[in-house]
Image (cartoon, rainbow, N blue to C red):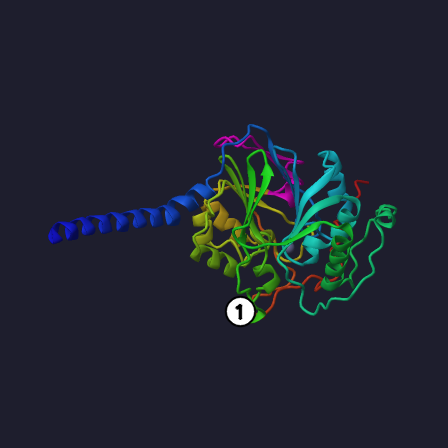
Amino acid sequence: MGRATKGCGCAAAILVVLLVAAGYAGWKYVLPWWKTKPPPPSGGELQVHILDVGPGNGDSILIISPAGKAVLVDAGDAGKGKVILDALKRYNVQQLDYFIATHPHPDHLGAADEVLRLTKVLNVIDNGLAPAGWEPTPTPTPSAKVLKNIKPVAKKPDKKASVIKFYEEYREVISQGGAHYEKAEPGKKFDLGGGAFLTILAPSQPFFTREQMKAGGNEPNSNSIVARLDYGDFSMLLPADAEQQTEQRMLTKDLNLQTDVLKVSHHGSKYATAADFLERVKPAVAIVSCGEWNRYGHPAQAVLDRLKAAGVKLYRTDLQGEITITTRGKEGDYKIATAKEAKTDLWEGRLAQKDDSSRAGFIAYGDFGPPPKPPKQKSTK
Ligand SMILES: [Zn+2]
C-alpha cells in the first residue's frame, strides 16, 4: 500500500515537472516568436519616402501606413523645413501620428521646429539624451493661438548655429505642441495600423560614452534610435546614424535584424555598416540618404564596396533625389521609385574634406566652412 502510494506520487511529480518544463519552453520560446510574428498585411499600401534633404547631409523619412497613419523619422537638415512640409502636403498628410528624433544632431533635428510648428503631432519619441553641454532652461509656453499665427520662415543654415541651439528649438516646439512624449526603449512596438508596426531595437543601456568611441566615432550617433518597420512580409531597417559599436552590440542580442531594405547607417559613413552586420541584416536593397555637398566623405567607398559584395541594389538620395518605396506587404512585391535618374555612378563614393581617422572624435556639425559652390556652367560662346 505504502509502496503503491509512493509510486503514484512519483508519476504525479514527473507529470508536474513535465508540465512546468513545457510551460517554461512555451513562455521562453513560443511566446516571443508569437509576439514578434507580424500579422498578415491588410492589403492596403504602405509608403516609405526617403526625402531629399540635401545638398548638405541629413535624414528625413516619411512613413505612411496602410491605415493612413504618418510617421516622420527625423527632420533634417537645418533649412529643410520647406522640403519636408511640401512632402507632407504632397502625400496629403494632415497630421503626424509619430515624430521620431533619432538623436540630437542638427542634420536630423535642424528643421524640426519649422515642421512641428505647422504640423499637428500626436506622439514624439526620442532617446532622452541631450547633446553634451546642454542644460535645461525654463521657457514660457505661449498659447496654441499664438503658435498658429506663426508663419513658416525658411531658415538658411547658420554657420554659428550650434548643436545645442537646434536641440533647444526642438525641445521648445515639442513642449508647446502638447504631443505625448515617449522615450525609445528596445522592444517597444508601435502599431501603425493596417498591419504595419515599428519596433525599437536600440539604443540599449548603458549608453555609449565618448571614451568608448573609436577615432571618428561619436556617442550621440552610437546612441541613435534604431527601428525596424514591418508590414506583412516587407521589412525595413532604420539605423539612423548608428556606429559600428551600435551594430556590434545589436549583433550580440537576440534581435531580428534581417530586413528587405536597409536605410544605410550614418549617410554611408565608413564607421558603420560593417560586413558582419550586413551579413545578419541580409538586405536586398540599400538606400543611402546623403547630400551631394556633404564634406564628410559620405557615402564612403569602403561602405559601397561592402554593399556591392553583399549583392544589394543601391539607391542614393544625393544622386536620385527622393526615394519612395511602396508595398502591399506580400513577399517581394515592393516597388521603388526615384525622383530622378542618377547622372553618375551609384557605386562611386565621396571623399572627405579632411581625414578624421587619426584623431579621436568625429567631424562635428559646423566643423567646416560653407559648402562648396556648385561648379559654374562654362560659357558656350
Ligand atoms: Zn546624420
Residue visible at 60% across and 59% down?
221
Q: x, y (%) of residue 96?
A: 70, 42
Residue visible at 35% across and 50% down?
24
Residue 338 in the image: above or below residue 281: above
Pick the front one: 191 or 198: 191
Indicate the quadrant containing the C terminus: top left, top right, bottom left or bottom right.
top right
Q: Is residue 317 magenta?
A: yes
Q: Residue furthest front?
A: 1
Label 1, on which residue? 212
Residue 321 in the image: above or below residue 147: above
Pick the front one: 279 or 189: 189
Q: x, y (%) of residue 126?
A: 64, 55
Q: Which residues are magenta?
A: 316-344
Q: How many marks?
A: 1
Q: In this view of the protein, can residue 159 be seen by the observer? A: yes
Secondary structure, mark 1, is helix
Q: x, y (%) of residue 247?
A: 49, 56
Q: The disc labelled 1 sits on which kind of residue? A: Gln
Q: x, y (%) of residue 92?
A: 73, 33
Mark 1: few/some/many CA within 10 Å (<14, 14-19, 20+): few
